[in-house]
Image: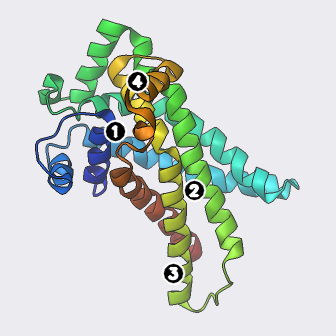
Amino acid sequence: RAFFPLGKAPAIGQSGYEVAGKGYWQKYFEAMKPPWRGSIVVIGGMTWARAAIFYGSDTGSKMMRDQGYGTGLSATVPSLVVSAFAQAVNQPFVRTSIMLQNPGEELAKKSMPNLAMMRHLAATKGIGSLWTGLDAAILKTAPKYMTAVVIKDYMGQLLAPVDPANKNAVLLKSAKVAVTAGVAGAVLTNPLDVVRNEMFKTEEGMIPCMARMSREDGPKWLFRGIGKNWVAVAAPIASTIFLTDRFKNWS
């Protein structure tokens, strides 16, 4: 839950929702403030998805390496498959949670806002609308975690070896890997975050949505909300990688 306000700010920025405030930082902190609509659903979805992605990636990578596959393929394929599955399961909750961040959204006042939004979308746009933007979401989420996992694996091999008995050196190396992987995944996939959130608002297909934003804003839309996004995404991904490594070393 500690990371939810960090995620709320870029969701609002990438979606183009209006927030009170004059300067950049005033709007940033205003966007982070409560109410944190849909936070329980988001946290639950992120928790199981990240656990599944990193556990499934590590397990699948080890199995593929044992079968003789190279490092690149072993690091890429399991993370891609598990990431796509997790995104498909979570997509209705992701869409409703992002739409609830609109400061003017009336359904956000309901006692179970995500469920209320799901019912509204299903009744007005059809049940399939709950998975609107899934193509952009998979193109976003899979590379985001895949990039993080691949960088984690490669950096673990490229960085100078450290003495396992030197706890400070081990922690520092793990932190370097985790932060680099998290930031890289967030920055590389920011445009797809923007596309997905815009699709939630307009019900457009991914390609038409990208074409329209390019006509209206030029290349600026590619960087919408990126300043908030790299912090919001990198922090939980980095902490997940870091803590996973720590727990594996303690076990």
Q: Where is residue 222 in the image (x, y as percent from the top left)?
A: 45, 40
* Number of the front mark, 2 or 4: 4
Q: Could you say which disc has been placed on residue 199 in the image?
A: 4
Judging depth in this view, the residue of 116 and 157 nearest the camera is 157
- Left/right placement of residue 121 relative to residue 147 reads left
Dot 2: element: helix
Q: Mark 2 points at which residue?
A: 148
Report if the CB atoms under discs 4 and 1 are less than 8 Å apart.
no
Q: In which quarter of the image is residue 26?
A: bottom left
**Given the image, on which type of amino acid does mark 2 rest?**
Ala
192 relative to 66 in the view: left or right? left
Query: Mark 1 = which residue?
Result: 14
Q: Where is residue 100 in the image (x, y as percent from the top left)?
A: 23, 31
Amino acid tagged 3: Leu
The answer to whether any part of residue 63 appears in the image is no
Regarding residue 168, the answer to whether it shows in the image is yes
First along the sequence among labels 3 and 4: 3
